[in-house]
Image (tube, coloured by chain):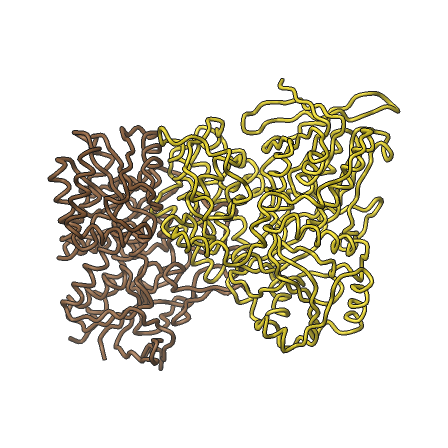
Chain colours: A yellow, B brown
Amino acid sequence: MKQMTADLLVIGGGSTGTGVAWDAALRGLRVVLVERRDLTHGTTGRYHGLLHSGGRYAVKDPQSALECIEENRILRRTHTHCIEDTSGFFVVTPEDEGDYPARFQAACTKVGIPCTEVPLREAFRREPLLNPRISRVFEVPDGAADSFLATHATAQAARQAGAQILVYHEVVALLTAGGEGDRRVVGAQVRDVVRDELIRIEASITVNAGGAWAGKLAATAGISVRVIPGKGVMVAVNHRLVNTVVNRCKMPADGDILVPVHTVAIIGTTDERVADPERFGIEPWEVALMLSEGDKLVPGLSRARILRAWAGVRPLYQEGYSGDSRDVTRALALLDHRQRDGVSGFLTITGGKWTTFRLMAEKTVDKACAQLGIDRACQTASTPVPGVEQGHYWLGHRLHEVEEAQLQGDLVCECELVTRAMVEQAAVNNPTVTLDDLRRDVRLGMGPCQGGFCTFRAAGILQELRAAPGAAESAEAEWSVAYLHSPRHHLQHRPVTLAPSHKALDNPNLLLRDFLQERWRGLTPVLWGRQLKQERLDELIYLGIMNIDHLPPDSDRSPLTEFWQQGAQEGEVSDG
Amino acid sequence: MVDLLVVGAGLTGLAAALRASELGLKVKVIAKGHGALYWSSGSIDVLGYVDSTQPAVERPWERIADLGAEHPYRRLGAERVRRAVEWFAGQEGVRSLGYAGNEAHNQLLPTPAGAWRPTYLAPAGQRAGERADLRPLVVVGLQGMRDFYPHLIARNLQLQGQTVRAVQIPWSVVSEQRDRNTAQLAECLDDPQAQQRLAGALQLVVQPGERVGLPAILGRHAHPAVLALLGEQLGSPVFEIPTLPPNVPGIRLAAVLRQQLQQRGVRVEIGMEGVGFRAQAGEIQWVESATSARPLVHRARTFLLATGGVLGGGFDSDHTGRFWETLFDLPLTVPQERQHWFRPHFLDPRGQPALHGGVAVDVHGQPVDAQGRVVYTNLWAAGSALAGTDPVLERSMEGVALASAVAAAERIAGLSPG
């Protein structure tokens, strides 16, 4: 069996896990991170993309609010290009009466969140689609975050600092040593899902950053961690209905946030406790609730074209808590299992939210360093990740670059303005196993046609990369994940052939089928009207023109095949 | 006032208008857009699969009896379906594109994904790709073309036992400009110089004895000339493989049908969506259309709904679970609860329930309600709007369109006092 050793083994490739790897590597630790699928495959890639100012929690959970505003300020410096500076409104609709607005203002002031009341005329000028019956508007420094890009950029920073990031590496079991009174976790046995190989990774400290899956992971070492999986349903509307994040000014509840994300707007969310983070459905009532609540912010939202619905599962944690998930704190929870369970060498970091991932990582690595007897200060708050020089992203950034460099003819995904070179570079330089990985890398298939055209094109391009003989040498040295979203940048690089290690890409028919199925899962909860017409065109393409349901079977299974089949049979899991 | 107002200008609407005009009716066509012909492969699928888990249908006429009782083919009978397809193949414009079949058999043609696709009639430009032909294939693409991938096609055909290789030639052979879709590339090849450049580039890569598969961009107007020129200069059979939409073979077919209608004096008004109507005593008086300038009222003795189903825009639906026919609000056989519309798998061989329903009609092709009563005495429906079939899943879209359109036109003409 292959062996590896590290100071720190991080389990989980979401925002928290990559943040831990980045922080620890900057402090000079030898770090290995394992993620069972692609980076951001879990909750990080399935949230609405809100960079919290803390306003949402100011009244109810001031500790969380304080963490949010501090981290908000830091991330704007360290992850500038992963954030759109949209600002945020808290609006009082006719249903939000009472003293909440006054309490909200006072709480923001107390926590230190800049909060100013915006004259209505000004607010409606900036956001003309807002409900005209809104009576008051407060502005706070909310933003929109691209959690896919941010996690990739963090991982890149971690790699540059020496960390090893292994995706499609699944923990089989934690390795433990010692007996009663002296138990310790000494690493994990890991399976390389693509090559189907076992690896033994020994580490002085193992960090469980498994998010909603953290409980399952801890259980492999006989430790009970009761993560409360809180399902949040989100719905994407095909227009960017607002340019500012819009929150209802009331106690947090369902469907009261509208976030502009790139070209679309996302309304969210619910909070339902679920038994299993992988097996749950999106119920018609949940979609209906998002639409009817959305109408209160932007009248007519429910009649807009809906692109997709999905759900993420929050890894909420409160020691000893067993009530409603909405009331669980959003504060981070760092569990030192030596103290808590008498098992050393093992930390669980959970709770929190995307906005506080860097802080979560800092606290975790502080604790790890203390246990290792290392005295090195955290550097992440003052260390920008690669790409910040691009500044905040903005709505037109891709279009601007495509037009400036005249790349219209190279667009593979017209909805999201993805060029052929972007697909090629992401496929070669990021460890791509499925088309869904490419979606997270470059936003392939996220737009109105939901993969109708680009799924086939991506499969064709990957096949070309494999088949084209004598292609140019690797551009790896110059390629940077920081420019994953920049059409212009990719123009400068020549395509390269895929390394033979891309075994899963030997199966273009599986890639096609799995990605179409993945898109279908997010479509069916919201498939009506014009989106249904679009879907019928996709059917005409894939059945009528391509006959893909009668392609020869590929020899292997894709790493995702089982996952999708399971989801389809036992309830729906979906992601954005 | 016309004898027949056809709403919809896809294959159904154009064929019905042509047949009715042949039979002496005064006809007008109004439509929102060009219909599904612009997207589809340009061949005439009659029946590709009765059961998607089974091999492709070999002889479609013999399998019509295996279809469900509600299927439009069952209502019409195999003979009338066959006569409609033969009528189509005999049309002057269709003949100019060389549509042909294999003596009551389906033919198998390569798809842009490299599967074999069963179809009944194919234009001359696609016929040389047939699976039954044992000669090796070379699939030639343009470097950087986003809607055609020869390596993917070759890889999959090879897995199915076909001797085939893939080659790319420079994009600049066809166009100097990168931002061109398939329809524009086809127009580039209307230029004799571009045709010569293409022939020259192909001569360098094609080996003797190979059949040459190219993306379906071989001329928009000059297609027969391009085919002839390439065949002559290469000494090899040349054929087109459909692409991602827009699909030029379908555009060519729509063009020849509209040209024939024009010659017969039938107006086809595109950009004129039917948005309202008036009925009196169970009879439709007129259909109202929306145009940029003003609403128009179209009076006719009879009306044919050929707006297609979901894809053509003939049906709409919303989040409350309502599913409706957009012009006359005809009753539909679609489940009225959203949770019954779709199955968990995109490629479920049974298809999706929401896409199987449609307008139920009587033996004469007239829309009926749940009790089987004719809804309007002078209204017919044809094509993808019909209940009882999912033509995309069955690969029967063009066959259903032609058979139901011709039957409706003949019925209307037969009832006509003239």
> Does residue A135 appear in the picture of this structure?
yes
In the depicted structure, whether residue B98 falls above or below residue A236: above
Q: Residue B376's x, y, as percent?
A: 34, 74
Looking at the image, which residue is at 38% across and 48% down?
A410
In the orientation shown, which residue stands out farthest toward the top?
Answer: A1
| Count of residue discs | 0
Does residue B272 lie above or below A516 as drawn?
Answer: below
Q: In this view, does A134 lie above or below A44?
A: below
Residue at the image point whose x is 33% and y is 76% from the top: B287
* Occupied quadrant, residue B169: top left
Direction from residue B250 to residue A571 in the image, left or right? right
Judging depth in this view, the residue of A235 and B206 nearest the camera is B206
Q: Can residue B353 be seen in this view?
A: no
Tell me where residue A261 appears, x and y as whole percent: 57, 57
In the rendered structure, the answer to whether residue A353 lies left or right of residue B142 reads right
Image coords of residue A478 (percent x, y): 50, 36
**Residue most extreme to the right:** A181
Is residue B417 placed above or below A205 in the rendered structure? below
- Quadrant location, the N terminus of chain B: bottom left
